Image (cartoon, helix red, strand yellow):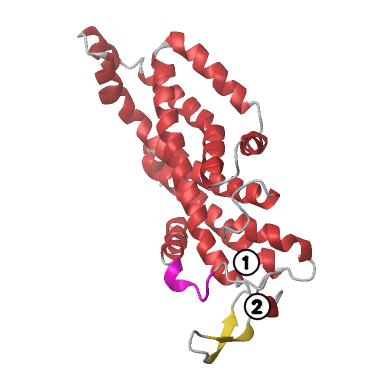
Amino acid sequence: MIGAAILLCVLFIGLAAPFLHTMSPDEINPSVRNKLPGYESTLRDDDGNKFQFVHLMGTDSLGRDIYSRVVFGARVSLLIGATVAALSALIGLILGLLAGYFRWLDAIVMRVMDGLMAIPAILLALSMVALLNAGLSTVIVAIVITEIPRVVRLVRSVVLSVREEPYVEAAISVGTPTPVLLIRHILPNTIAPLIVQTTYIAAHAILVEAVLSFLGVGISPETPTWGNIMAEGRAMFVMLPHNIFFPGLFLAVTVLAVNLFGDGLRDLLDPRMRKRL
C-alpha cells in the first residue's frame, strides 16, 4: 500500500506537470546559473512587469529551473517504464506460451533467450542505442529486448507445469483445438506471476533509462529526464550536489515504490502467501 501510494503521487506529478511546473523546463536564463535551492530571482512577464520567482530546487549550469525539469522528467520515466513493461509482457507471453507447449520450438526459443541473457542488460542496451539513433523509441526498444528473456522464462516454466495437469490432458483428449487450449486453460495460470514480473520490469526500465541518459547515450540531452539532469550536474557535483540529489531522490523513490508495489502484488496473488498473511 505504501508503494502504491508513492507511485500514485509520482504518477500525479507526471500527469499534472504542465500545471505544477513553475517555468518552462527548457527556458535558459544565464543570469541565474548554478543557484542553490530557494534562490529568488527577478523575472519579467510579457507586459514588462517584474515579479519574484523562487527556484525550489535551484538551477543548473544553463540557468534552467531544476524543479520544473524534475517534474517533467517524471512523465518520461513513467512512460518508458509502462511501455517497456507492456511490450515485454506481451512479446514474452506469446513466446513463453509457444516455447512451453511445443517442445520442438522450446529448444530454438530458449537458446536465443539464453544468448540474450548472457549479455549484461546495460551492455546490450548500449549496443542497441549505438547502432540506432538515440531517442525515446530507440531506448524503449533497447530495454524491451533485454527484458523479454525474463518474461519468456517465467511463462515457459508455468506452462511446463500446467500442461501436465489432468484438466489439460482431458481437454487434449476430447480434441480441443490448440489455440483454445492455450487461451482458455493455460493462459489464465500465467496472469498472476506475469503481473508481478511486469512491475519489476517497469522499475528496472526506469533505472536503465536513467543510466543510459546519464552516460549520454539515451534520450537527447535537451529532453528533461532524471538521467539527463544528473548527467548535466555531475561536473559540479562537489560544489553543487543539488543538481544530482533531487532527480536522484525522485528516481530512487520511484523505483523503490514500484518494487514495493510488486512485492505486495506477489503476496496478494499467491494463495500460499495469502494464507500466511
* Label drawn at residue 246: 1
Residue 120 visible in this rendered orientation of the protein: yes
Q: Are marks 1 and 2 in contact (CB under 8 Å)?
A: yes
Q: What segment carries the magenta color?
A: 17-24
Residue 272 visible in this rendered orientation of the protein: no
Residue at image x 60%, y 41%? 133
Q: As drawn, is 164 to the left or to the right of 9?
A: left
Q: Secondary structure at mark 1?
A: helix
Residue 82: x and y in percent read: 44, 47
Q: Quadrant of residue 26?
A: bottom right
User: Looking at the image, is mark 1 or mark 2 earlier in the sequence?
Assistant: 2
Q: Does the magenta run of residues contain 113? A: no
Residue at image x 45%, y 65%? 13
* Label drawn at residue 15: none
Residue under circle 2?
Answer: 37
Q: Does the magenta run of residues contain 22? A: yes
Front residue of 271/212: it is: 212
What amino acid does circle 2 point to? Answer: Pro
Q: As drawn, is 59 to the left or to the right of 138?
A: right
Q: Secondary structure at mark 2?
A: loop
